[in-house]
Image: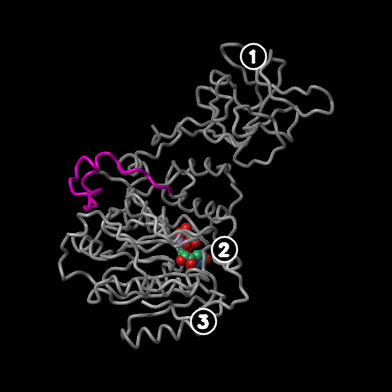
């Protein structure tokens, strides 16, 4: 096991730190680690003794990339060749999302030729002629694939031993299942493998993915943890950022930009249109979570736009929760999320179930707020340049502060219920939990003490303070109002 070939080592002029900034991981180290380095086998013991049929569907593995380091991509390819039974691995499809790095052009083509000299026809490359984002890169890879099953992965991965067999045999059993492996984390600094617990992938109302602990029933009804028995035990949705899947319901929403949303869209579409998603504990893939994303500093812009596409197509009345989560007005949100008419048609054509069905049957952990009347920032009519703010953290004293509308000023879980009670997430709780607020432009009064939330200025040069005091008639407004949220029949 020698060191990686030195031909792709970066010029000595580039300091390790510059490389780190450019890629979001320690390229200096990656370039010096063997391409076929061993990684710990993180599977459960029961996975290691499991036998799978020899005869399984064939596999295409898609690796998408935009300006990833050469050694990273070659290590991914090497792991796939070494750890997938060769009679099942039909091809590896690289998708270049219009990278600008020089080494990813001619030098990569040469590498592909070398691999194909040893393994005829194994490697293919699709190159975008302009930057199209990760969703389109995945779609392009899918379209170029010719095997029975397609695994779509980032290019900064190393598959672990025995990763493919559980996936292929599960799909052989049931072709409507979409599988996610368990992703362990390769640390961006030292490239050590950090084992992740098996968990279900869920999402919040902003449609960011998050790990959900496994439901109790999963432990209760399986004595063999190597079985991905979510199917029988629970209906937890798995919508990971990385999908291994077989699809007949369309691949991904090609209208998504740059980053985010495509995973939740896939998850909803699969469940609502008659399929299911499972995490298979015996299939493990090591994924490098980068320290930062070099291609975009603020992912939330793309995420927000893509989330609205998902909301508009798949979430029916519950779409308002996505608008709350992003603090956008429901009418005229001022965000161009593109044309969703063909996605709506697809939903109709496939005769998919409602989001209400989904949330009640598949993902009951996702709780909607059905009684929201107002949301957003909160201002006093005395001075509209300042907003209620959660104040210094740690601490539990809300303050008035120049309005910036970042999260510390958005009454996120704070909302007015239809019964006119003001519920606040800030530390205001203690003195406001019994407050009444007769909608926009009214005072905010604690029902018990009859004192009001008001602002005072101690002298002309000091800033306004937030106080509870005898009411002087000050009035408050919250940024957004919902007219008929909660009255919708589906939300009961
Ligand atoms: N990627 C791409 N085009 C883009 C942005 C990202 O092809 O415009 C690729 C990137 O190289 C990576 C994958 O998409 O292989 C997923 O991106 P990333 O790893 O940054 O996101 P994650 O889903 O892991 O958070
Ligand atoms: Mn990634």
Say above or below: 177 vs 159: above
- Quadrant (top left, top right, bottom left, bottom right) of the C terminus: top left
Q: Is residue 43 left or right of residue 372?
A: left
Q: Can residue 374 be seen in this view?
A: yes
- Quadrant (top left, top right, bottom left, bottom right) of the N terminus: bottom left
Which residue is pictured at 22% across the width and 49% down the height? Answer: 225
Outermost residue on the front side: it is 2
Near mark 1 (Cα within 10 A), the count class, few <14, some 14-19 or many ≥20, is some
Specify which label sits upstream in the sequence, 3 or 2: 3
Say above or below: 310 vs 385: below
- In the rendered image, residue 217 lying in the magenta stretch gets the answer yes
Outermost residue on the top side: it is 449
Which secondary structure lies at badge 3?
Answer: loop
| Residue that numbered label 2 is attached to | 294
Near mark 3 (Cα within 10 A), the count class, few <14, some 14-19 or many ≥20, is some
Say above or below: 380 vs 211: above
Q: Is residue 341 visible?
A: no
Q: In x, y percent, where is residue 433?
A: 54, 21
Q: In x, y percent, where is residue 449?
A: 60, 11
Question: Marks 2 and 1, Cα distance to the nearest angstrom?
Answer: 51 Å
Which secondary structure lies at badge 2?
Answer: loop
Which residue is pictured at 59% across the width and 64% down the height? Answer: 21
Q: Give the range drawn in magenta.
A: 210-233
Question: Marks 3 and 2, Cα distance to the nearest angstrom?
Answer: 19 Å
> Foreground: 449 or 89?
89
């Amino acid at each position: 096991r020698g060191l990686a070939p030195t031909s792709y080592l970066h010029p000595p002029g580039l300091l390790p730190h510059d490389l780190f900034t450019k890629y979001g991981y320690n390229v200096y180290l990656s370039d010096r680690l063997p391409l076929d380095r061993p990684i710990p086998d993180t599977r459960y013991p029961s996975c290691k003794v499991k036998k799978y049929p020899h005869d399984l569907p064939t596999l295409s593995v898609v690796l998408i990339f935009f300006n990833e380091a050469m050694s990273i991509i070659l290590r991914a390819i090497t792991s796939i060749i070494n750890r997938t039974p060769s009679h099942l691995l039909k091809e590896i499809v690289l998708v270049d999302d219009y990278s600008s790095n020089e080494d990813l052009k001619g030098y990569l083509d040469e590498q592909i030729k070398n691999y194909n000299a040893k393994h005829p026809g194994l490697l293919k490359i699709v190159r975008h002629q302009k930057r199209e984002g990760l969703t389109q890169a995945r779609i392009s890879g899918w379209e170029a694939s010719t095997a029975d099953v397609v695994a779509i992965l980032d290019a900064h991965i190393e598959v672990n031993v025995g990763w493919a067999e559980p996936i292929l045999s599960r799909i052989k059993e049931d072709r409507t299942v979409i599988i996610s492996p368990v992703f362990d984390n390769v640390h961006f600094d030292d490239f050590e493998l950090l084992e992740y617990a098996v968990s279900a992938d869920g999402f919040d109302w902003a449609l960011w993915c998050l790990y959900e602990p496994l439901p109790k029933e999963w432990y209760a009804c399986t004595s063999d943890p190597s079985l991905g028995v979510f199917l029988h035990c629970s209906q937890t949705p798995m919508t990971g950022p990385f999908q291994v899947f077989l699809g007949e319901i369309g691949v991904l929403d090609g209208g998504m930009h740059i980053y985010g949303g495509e995973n939740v869209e896939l998850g909803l579409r699969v469940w609502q249109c008659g399929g299911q998603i499972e995490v298979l504990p015996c299939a493990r893939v090591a994924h490098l979570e980068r320290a930062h994303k070099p291609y975009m500093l603020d992912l939330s812009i793309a995420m927000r736009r893509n989330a609205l596409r998902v909301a508009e197509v798949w979430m029916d009345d519950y779409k308002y929760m996505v608008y709350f989560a992003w603090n956008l007005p429901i009418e005229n949100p001022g965000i161009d999320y593109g044309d969703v008419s063909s996605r709506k048609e697809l939903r109709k054509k496939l005769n998919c179930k409602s989001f209400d069905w989904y949330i009640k049957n598949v993902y009951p952990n996702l709780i909607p707020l059905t009684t929201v009347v107002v949301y957003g920032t909160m201002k006093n009519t005395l001075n509209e340049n300042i907003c209620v703010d959660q104040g210094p953290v740690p601490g539990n004293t809300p303050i008035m502060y120049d309005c910036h509308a970042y999260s510390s000023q958005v009454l996120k879980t704070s909302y007015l219920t239809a019964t006119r009670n003001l519920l606040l997430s800030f530390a205001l709780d203690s003195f406001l939990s019994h407050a009444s607020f007769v909608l926009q432009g009214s005072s905010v009064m604690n029902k018990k003490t009859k004192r009001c939330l008001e602002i005072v200025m101690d002298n002309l040069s000091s800033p306004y303070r937030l106080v509870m005091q005898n009411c002087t008639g000050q009035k408050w407004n919250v940024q957004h109002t919902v007219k008929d949220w909660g009255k919708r029949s589906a939300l009961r």
